[in-house]
Image: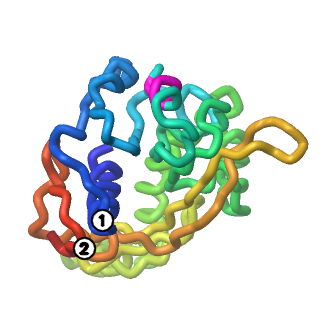
Amino acid sequence: MWAGRGGFIAGFCALGGRISSADRLWTGPSSDAGARVPRIPSNVDGLFLPGMTGGGPGGGALGGTGTAVPRWAKLHPPLGRHLLVGWAVLSNDPRLLGVVGSNPDPWFSPTPAWRRYTADFHKAFPNVFDPSLNNQPYYDAVEPVLEALAQVHGDLSGGERRFASALAHLRYHSPEGLITLDARHQAIAPIYLYKVERRHGGGIHVKQIGELPHVHQTLDGYFSPTSPAPSFTQPACHRGVHGT
Protein backbone atom coordinates (compact mmCIF):
# COMPACT_ATOMS: atom_id res chain seq x y z
CA MET A 1 0.00 0.00 0.00
CA TRP A 2 3.02 2.33 0.17
CA ALA A 3 2.77 3.47 -3.44
CA GLY A 4 -0.98 4.10 -3.34
CA ARG A 5 -0.79 5.99 -0.08
CA GLY A 6 2.19 8.02 -1.27
CA GLY A 7 0.47 8.92 -4.51
CA PHE A 8 -2.66 10.07 -2.70
CA ILE A 9 -0.69 12.26 -0.29
CA ALA A 10 1.32 13.90 -3.08
CA GLY A 11 -1.72 14.75 -5.20
CA PHE A 12 -3.97 15.72 -2.31
CA CYS A 13 -1.43 18.08 -0.75
CA ALA A 14 -0.47 19.62 -4.11
CA LEU A 15 -4.10 20.69 -4.52
CA GLY A 16 -4.15 22.37 -1.12
CA GLY A 17 -5.01 19.48 1.20
CA ARG A 18 -3.36 19.35 4.60
CA ILE A 19 -1.93 16.26 6.26
CA SER A 20 0.19 16.49 9.39
CA SER A 21 2.45 13.76 10.74
CA ALA A 22 -0.14 13.19 13.46
CA ASP A 23 -2.78 12.46 10.82
CA ARG A 24 -0.95 9.36 9.56
CA LEU A 25 -2.21 6.40 11.54
CA TRP A 26 -0.87 2.87 11.08
CA THR A 27 -2.28 -0.55 11.70
CA GLY A 28 -0.90 -4.03 11.21
CA PRO A 29 -2.32 -6.46 8.62
CA SER A 30 -4.25 -8.38 11.27
CA SER A 31 -5.44 -5.44 13.37
CA ASP A 32 -8.67 -3.48 13.13
CA ALA A 33 -8.29 -0.01 11.64
CA GLY A 34 -11.45 1.03 13.49
CA ALA A 35 -9.52 1.08 16.75
CA ARG A 36 -7.59 4.07 15.39
CA VAL A 37 -10.67 6.15 14.55
CA PRO A 38 -11.11 7.61 18.08
CA ARG A 39 -7.52 8.89 17.86
CA ILE A 40 -8.22 11.01 14.78
CA PRO A 41 -8.39 14.73 15.75
CA SER A 42 -11.87 16.20 15.59
CA ASN A 43 -10.80 18.86 13.04
CA VAL A 44 -9.89 16.19 10.47
CA ASP A 45 -12.70 16.14 7.92
CA GLY A 46 -11.57 13.32 5.63
CA LEU A 47 -10.15 9.81 5.82
CA PHE A 48 -8.25 7.80 3.21
CA LEU A 49 -8.23 4.02 3.60
CA PRO A 50 -5.83 2.43 1.10
CA GLY A 51 -6.68 -0.99 2.53
CA MET A 52 -4.86 -3.90 4.08
CA THR A 53 -4.67 -7.63 3.59
CA GLY A 54 -7.89 -9.54 3.25
CA GLY A 55 -11.05 -8.88 1.29
CA GLY A 56 -10.96 -7.83 -2.34
CA PRO A 57 -13.10 -6.18 -4.99
CA GLY A 58 -16.72 -7.13 -4.74
CA GLY A 59 -16.20 -9.17 -1.61
CA GLY A 60 -17.81 -6.74 0.81
CA ALA A 61 -15.09 -7.43 3.38
CA LEU A 62 -13.87 -3.81 3.36
CA GLY A 63 -10.35 -5.04 2.72
CA GLY A 64 -9.67 -5.92 6.35
CA THR A 65 -10.56 -2.44 7.64
CA GLY A 66 -13.02 -3.91 10.13
CA THR A 67 -15.01 -1.32 12.08
CA ALA A 68 -13.23 1.73 10.63
CA VAL A 69 -15.94 2.56 8.09
CA PRO A 70 -19.00 2.37 10.37
CA ARG A 71 -17.20 4.28 13.14
CA TRP A 72 -16.08 7.00 10.73
CA ALA A 73 -19.56 7.17 9.20
CA LYS A 74 -21.07 8.02 12.59
CA LEU A 75 -18.62 10.89 13.05
CA HIS A 76 -18.72 12.29 9.51
CA PRO A 77 -21.91 11.69 7.54
CA PRO A 78 -22.47 11.53 4.63
CA LEU A 79 -19.65 9.08 4.14
CA GLY A 80 -19.17 9.84 0.45
CA ARG A 81 -17.92 13.35 1.28
CA HIS A 82 -15.48 12.29 3.98
CA LEU A 83 -13.95 9.00 2.83
CA LEU A 84 -11.78 7.82 -0.07
CA VAL A 85 -10.65 4.22 -0.46
CA GLY A 86 -8.12 2.17 -2.36
CA TRP A 87 -8.69 -0.99 -4.36
CA ALA A 88 -8.42 -3.30 -1.33
CA VAL A 89 -11.37 -1.56 0.36
CA LEU A 90 -13.54 -0.72 -2.65
CA SER A 91 -16.51 -3.08 -2.83
CA ASN A 92 -20.28 -3.20 -3.25
CA ASP A 93 -20.71 -3.16 0.53
CA PRO A 94 -23.72 -0.95 1.43
CA ARG A 95 -21.67 0.67 4.19
CA LEU A 96 -19.60 2.34 1.44
CA LEU A 97 -22.56 4.00 -0.28
CA GLY A 98 -21.39 7.21 -1.96
CA VAL A 99 -17.69 6.47 -1.51
CA VAL A 100 -15.24 6.91 -4.40
CA GLY A 101 -12.22 4.66 -4.90
CA SER A 102 -9.75 3.47 -7.48
CA ASN A 103 -8.66 0.14 -8.92
CA PRO A 104 -5.93 -0.81 -11.41
CA ASP A 105 -8.34 -3.40 -12.88
CA PRO A 106 -11.65 -2.86 -14.73
CA TRP A 107 -13.17 -5.26 -12.22
CA PHE A 108 -16.53 -3.54 -11.80
CA SER A 109 -16.95 -2.51 -15.47
CA PRO A 110 -15.27 -5.36 -17.34
CA THR A 111 -13.76 -4.58 -20.73
CA PRO A 112 -13.78 -7.23 -23.48
CA ALA A 113 -10.11 -7.98 -22.76
CA TRP A 114 -10.84 -8.41 -19.05
CA ARG A 115 -13.78 -10.71 -19.77
CA ARG A 116 -11.62 -12.86 -22.07
CA TYR A 117 -8.88 -13.12 -19.47
CA THR A 118 -11.19 -14.12 -16.62
CA ALA A 119 -13.06 -16.60 -18.85
CA ASP A 120 -9.79 -18.20 -19.96
CA PHE A 121 -8.59 -18.37 -16.37
CA HIS A 122 -11.72 -20.11 -15.14
CA LYS A 123 -11.60 -22.48 -18.10
CA ALA A 124 -8.00 -23.43 -17.33
CA PHE A 125 -8.52 -23.58 -13.56
CA PRO A 126 -12.22 -24.43 -13.02
CA ASN A 127 -11.77 -25.33 -9.35
CA VAL A 128 -9.81 -22.22 -8.37
CA PHE A 129 -11.59 -19.10 -7.17
CA ASP A 130 -9.41 -16.06 -7.57
CA PRO A 131 -10.75 -12.50 -7.85
CA SER A 132 -7.76 -11.58 -10.06
CA LEU A 133 -5.73 -9.90 -7.33
CA ASN A 134 -3.44 -12.89 -6.92
CA ASN A 135 -3.15 -14.44 -10.37
CA GLN A 136 -3.39 -11.49 -12.74
CA PRO A 137 -0.26 -9.51 -11.68
CA TYR A 138 1.82 -12.62 -12.29
CA TYR A 139 0.24 -13.02 -15.71
CA ASP A 140 1.25 -9.44 -16.47
CA ALA A 141 4.81 -10.26 -15.44
CA VAL A 142 5.12 -13.33 -17.69
CA GLU A 143 3.05 -12.53 -20.79
CA PRO A 144 5.14 -9.50 -21.92
CA VAL A 145 8.30 -11.59 -21.59
CA LEU A 146 6.81 -14.24 -23.85
CA GLU A 147 5.68 -11.64 -26.38
CA ALA A 148 9.13 -10.03 -26.46
CA LEU A 149 10.77 -13.45 -26.85
CA ALA A 150 8.47 -14.17 -29.78
CA GLN A 151 9.48 -10.89 -31.43
CA VAL A 152 13.18 -11.85 -31.34
CA HIS A 153 12.43 -15.52 -32.14
CA GLY A 154 13.96 -16.60 -28.84
CA ASP A 155 17.35 -15.08 -29.71
CA LEU A 156 19.09 -14.07 -26.47
CA SER A 157 22.55 -13.67 -27.96
CA GLY A 158 24.65 -10.52 -27.77
CA GLY A 159 23.93 -9.86 -24.12
CA GLU A 160 20.17 -10.10 -24.76
CA ARG A 161 20.20 -6.61 -26.27
CA ARG A 162 17.51 -7.33 -28.90
CA PHE A 163 15.33 -8.95 -26.27
CA ALA A 164 15.77 -6.00 -23.88
CA SER A 165 14.91 -3.58 -26.69
CA ALA A 166 11.80 -5.56 -27.58
CA LEU A 167 10.65 -5.40 -23.95
CA ALA A 168 11.37 -1.68 -23.70
CA HIS A 169 9.29 -0.88 -26.79
CA LEU A 170 6.53 -3.44 -26.27
CA ARG A 171 2.93 -2.22 -26.39
CA TYR A 172 1.42 -4.80 -24.10
CA HIS A 173 -2.35 -5.11 -24.39
CA SER A 174 -2.99 -6.50 -20.92
CA PRO A 175 -6.34 -7.58 -19.44
CA GLU A 176 -6.47 -4.15 -17.75
CA GLY A 177 -5.63 -2.14 -20.86
CA LEU A 178 -2.58 -0.89 -22.74
CA ILE A 179 0.67 -0.98 -20.74
CA THR A 180 3.96 0.47 -21.98
CA LEU A 181 7.27 1.31 -20.29
CA ASP A 182 8.78 4.72 -19.63
CA ALA A 183 12.45 5.62 -20.13
CA ARG A 184 13.29 3.98 -16.81
CA HIS A 185 11.42 0.77 -17.72
CA GLN A 186 8.58 1.48 -15.30
CA ALA A 187 5.01 0.73 -16.30
CA ILE A 188 2.62 3.30 -17.75
CA ALA A 189 -0.82 1.81 -17.16
CA PRO A 190 -4.52 2.67 -16.77
CA ILE A 191 -6.30 3.32 -13.48
CA TYR A 192 -10.07 3.12 -13.06
CA LEU A 193 -12.19 5.31 -10.78
CA TYR A 194 -15.37 3.99 -9.19
CA LYS A 195 -18.22 5.13 -6.97
CA VAL A 196 -20.46 2.98 -4.79
CA GLU A 197 -24.05 3.81 -5.77
CA ARG A 198 -27.58 2.55 -5.34
CA ARG A 199 -29.11 0.92 -8.41
CA HIS A 200 -32.27 2.40 -9.87
CA GLY A 201 -34.02 -0.92 -9.34
CA GLY A 202 -32.59 -1.41 -5.86
CA GLY A 203 -29.41 -2.86 -4.48
CA ILE A 204 -25.85 -1.55 -4.39
CA HIS A 205 -23.31 -1.57 -7.19
CA VAL A 206 -19.92 -0.06 -7.94
CA LYS A 207 -20.11 2.23 -10.98
CA GLN A 208 -17.13 3.27 -13.06
CA ILE A 209 -16.99 7.05 -13.17
CA GLY A 210 -13.69 7.57 -14.96
CA GLU A 211 -10.55 6.10 -16.47
CA LEU A 212 -7.01 7.50 -16.41
CA PRO A 213 -5.36 5.71 -19.34
CA HIS A 214 -1.65 6.61 -19.05
CA VAL A 215 -0.63 6.81 -15.39
CA HIS A 216 3.14 6.73 -14.92
CA GLN A 217 5.36 6.45 -11.87
CA THR A 218 5.95 10.20 -11.50
CA LEU A 219 2.18 10.76 -11.13
CA ASP A 220 2.40 13.82 -13.38
CA GLY A 221 5.61 15.08 -11.83
CA TYR A 222 4.95 14.59 -8.13
CA PHE A 223 7.81 12.09 -7.90
CA SER A 224 11.28 11.90 -9.44
CA PRO A 225 14.23 9.48 -9.26
CA THR A 226 15.57 11.49 -6.30
CA SER A 227 12.32 11.53 -4.33
CA PRO A 228 12.45 9.72 -0.97
CA ALA A 229 10.78 6.33 -1.03
CA PRO A 230 7.29 6.27 0.55
CA SER A 231 7.52 5.57 4.26
CA PHE A 232 5.83 6.40 7.57
CA THR A 233 6.77 10.06 7.05
CA GLN A 234 7.20 10.38 3.27
CA PRO A 235 6.11 11.96 1.06
CA ALA A 236 5.93 15.23 2.92
CA CYS A 237 2.83 17.34 2.43
CA HIS A 238 3.54 20.27 0.07
CA ARG A 239 1.12 22.48 -1.81
CA GLY A 240 1.60 22.69 -5.58
CA VAL A 241 4.99 20.99 -5.55
CA HIS A 242 6.06 18.67 -8.37
CA GLY A 243 9.14 16.48 -8.52
CA THR A 244 9.80 16.46 -4.78
Please give the residue where the numbered disc 1 appears in the rendered image.
16
Q: Which mark is first along the chain, 2 or 1?
A: 1
For the question of whether residue 134 can be seen, the reply is no
Camera-side residue of 17 and 125: 17
User: What's drawn in magenta, residue-wise?
Assistant: 68-72
Left or right, 200 with reference to 5: right
Question: At 73% from the left edge and 43% from the top edge, which residue is drawn?
Answer: 205
**Mark 1 or 2, which is nearer the eye?**
1
Left or right, 204 with reference to 180: right
Label 2 neighbour load within 10 Å: few <14, some 14-19, many 20+: some
Question: At 69% from the left edge and 39% from the top edge, which residue is drawn?
Answer: 122
Residue 59 lies, with reference to residue 157, above or below; the image says above
Measuring from the top left, give residue 180's x and y in whole percent.
Answer: 42, 74
The amino acid beneath tag 1 is Gly
Measuring from the top left, give residue 168's x and y in whole percent.
Answer: 34, 77
Label 2: state its secondary structure.
Answer: loop
Question: At 26% from the left edge and 76% from the top edge, which residue is drawn?
Answer: 221
Question: At 47% from the left edge and 47% from the top edge, which residue is drawn?
Answer: 84
Label 1: state its secondary structure.
Answer: loop
Circle count: 2
Question: Does 141 appear in magenta?
Answer: no
The amino acid beneath tag 2 is Gly
Please give the residue where the numbered disc 2 appears in the rendered image.
240
Question: Does 69 appear in magenta?
Answer: yes
- Label the magenta part by its dominant secondary structure: helix
Measuring from the top left, give residue 209's x and y in whole percent.
Answer: 64, 61
Label 1 neighbour load within 10 Å: few <14, some 14-19, many 20+: few
Camera-side residue of 186 and 244: 244
